[in-house]
Image: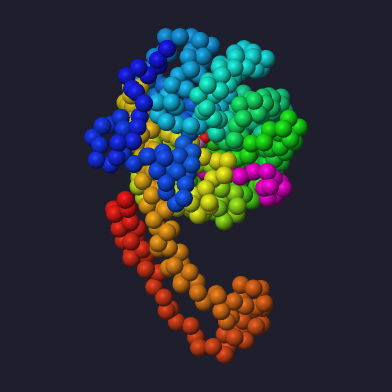
């Protein structure tokens, strides 16, 4: 059965095409910087935004019109699992991501949840076999159900903690069965609302214990995916422990977990943390922790996690710049953790939104590749720091210098004066030039 009857397979028609149902820049087999676009851009469909979400917001009900609306519980879940493959096929997406609750109804007990998951995973496994589509990552939703109001790994209730552990255990088994490249932890409720009722030390130790148990269990069952943590500073919880990349890396280092984890960074989460996305990527990259991306964008006029499809060529260029400098994302990819706006309620909007996101990342990739090829920023930066390549600068970098040797040097040196402009305006103009002219 066709769930998206009105749309046929999307293909590349070039930048002059006026067909809204065509890629203008995403040309999967085109070679950029030695690899095909498809290899650089391992795009993934987010099951929750594409198949499960209906557009409800705190002020209004669901608006989305979907062909599976009339079905109930497990039949609806089965229909969505089939629809996933039709959507990925038509959209030319090779990967997908899901939370356990996206694919299967929770039912009345954990046993029933496990059994519902198994029923749907049978369909997903079959669909993956016949279509060749792959699972970028899966995760356990430990934030929606009321039992998680106080957190999952950070809960005050040990029975809830055990329930969360049971979800993670099943998630790893599912990940192993479906050959997931990664397993994600996003701690939406791993934080606190007020210190007046919170044992912060115990909460953080317990989260680390849950992560360690996951690492041990993965080893036990032979799950070879990469573990990822997705930082976010707030929303739904007021203070979330995985605030941003730097905080999360420090947490992992404290608990000796940094060898087992990388980061899944999301653009809108960076905005909420008061950072640019490229800042978060850079922090992860220079620490060897850049794992995967959740592609979306926020709205600076709104200030919450709007999860819009990415549409900014500046952001896409600087994002792909970091990815290329990282030599790719390894097992990671680019998951569209993005949703269509509530008034974009028709199934066609899901396609149009993905086209716009995939196109802007494709164009960003090409601009970033050209910037790197021409060493536009590399040469400027190398020159800017060139005083550290010789003389006293080389002594500082090699570790030979001491406070005494540097004081001695400074006493005998001319008082340094500002001698280099940062040239920020010029660099921005050059970035514009590349964006406007890159073919
Ligand atoms: C929420 C968010 C999640 C994670 C997975 O802001 O980004 O969907 O990506 O749990
Ligand atoms: Co996300």
User: Depth check: 88 or 419 in front?
Assistant: 88
Residue at 37% across, 39% down: 26
User: Depth check: 392 or 364 in front?
Assistant: 364
Residue at 52% across, 48% down: 328
310 vs 207, left or right, is left
118 vs 47, left or right, is right
153 vs 336, left or right, is right
Residue at 48% across, 69% down: 382
User: Depth check: 61 or 263 in front?
Assistant: 263
Where is residue 437 shown, x and y percent of the image?
Answer: 29, 54
Whether residue 243 can be seen here:
no
- Boundaries of the magenta span: 253-265
Q: Quadrant of residue 342?
A: top left
The color scheme shown is rainbow
Q: Does 80 appear in magenta? A: no
Q: Quadrant of the N terminus?
A: top left
Q: Quadrant of residue 329?
A: top right
Where is residue 200 shown, x and y percent of the image?
Answer: 67, 42
Q: How many marks?
A: 0
When the figure is inspected, residue 419 is found, relative to residue 340, above or below; the finding is below
Q: Does 255 appear in magenta? A: yes
335 vs 252, left or right, is left
Q: Quadrant of residue 203?
A: top right
């Amino acid at each position: 059965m066709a769930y998206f009857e009105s749309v046929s397979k999307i293909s590349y028609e070039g930048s002059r095409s006026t067909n809204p149902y065509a890629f203008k820049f995403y040309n999967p087999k085109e070679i950029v910087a030695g690899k095909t676009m498809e290899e650089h851009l391992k795009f993934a469909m987010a099951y929750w935004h594409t198949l499960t979400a209906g557009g409800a917001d705190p002020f209004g009900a669901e608006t989305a019109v979907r062909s599976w609306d009339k079905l109930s519980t497990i039949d609806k879940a089965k229909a969505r699992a089939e629809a996933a493959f039709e959507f990925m096929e038509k959209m030319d997406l090779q990967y997908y991501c899901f939370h356990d609750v996206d694919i299967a109804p929770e039912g009345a007990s954990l046993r029933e949840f496990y059994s519902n998951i198994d029923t749907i995973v049978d369909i997903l496994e079959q669909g993956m076999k016949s279509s060749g589509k792959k699972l970028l990552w899966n995760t356990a939703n430990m934030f929606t159900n009321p039992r998680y109001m106080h957190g999952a790994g950070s809960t005050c209730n040990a029975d809830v903690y055990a329930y969360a552990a049971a979800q993670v255990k099943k998630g790893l088994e599912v990940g192993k069965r479906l050959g997931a490249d990664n397993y994600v932890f996003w701690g939406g409720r791993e934080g606190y609302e007020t210190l007046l009722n919170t044992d912060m030390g115990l909460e953080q130790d317990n989260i680390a214990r849950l992560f360690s148990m996951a690492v041990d269990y993965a080893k036990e069952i032979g799950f070879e995916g990469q573990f990822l943590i997705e930082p976010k500073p707030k929303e739904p919880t007021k203070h979330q422990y995985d605030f941003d990349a730097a905080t999360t890396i420090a947490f992992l280092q404290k608990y000796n977990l940094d060898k087992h984890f990388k980061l899944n960074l999301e653009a809108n989460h960076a905005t909420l943390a008061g950072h640019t996305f490229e800042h978060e990527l850079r922090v992860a990259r220079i620490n060897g922790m850049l794992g995967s991306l959740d592609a979306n964008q926020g709205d600076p006029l709104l200030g919450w996690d709007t999860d819009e499809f990415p549409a900014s060529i500046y952001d896409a260029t600087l994002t792909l710049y970091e990815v290329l400098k990282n030599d790719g994302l390894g097992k990671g990819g680019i998951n569209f953790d993005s949703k269509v706006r509530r008034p974009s309620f028709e199934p066609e909007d899901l396609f149009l939104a993905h086209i716009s996101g995939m196109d802007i990342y494709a164009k960003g990739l090409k601009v970033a590749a050209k910037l790197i090829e021409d060493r536009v920023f590399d040469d400027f930066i190398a020159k800017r720091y060139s005083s550290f390549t010789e003389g006293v600068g080389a002594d500082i970098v090699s570790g030979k210098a001491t406070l005494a040797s540097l004081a001695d040097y400074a006493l005998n040196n001319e008082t340094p004066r500002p001698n280099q402009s940062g040239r920020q305006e010029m660099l921005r103009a050059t970035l514009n030039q590349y964006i406007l002219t890159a073919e």
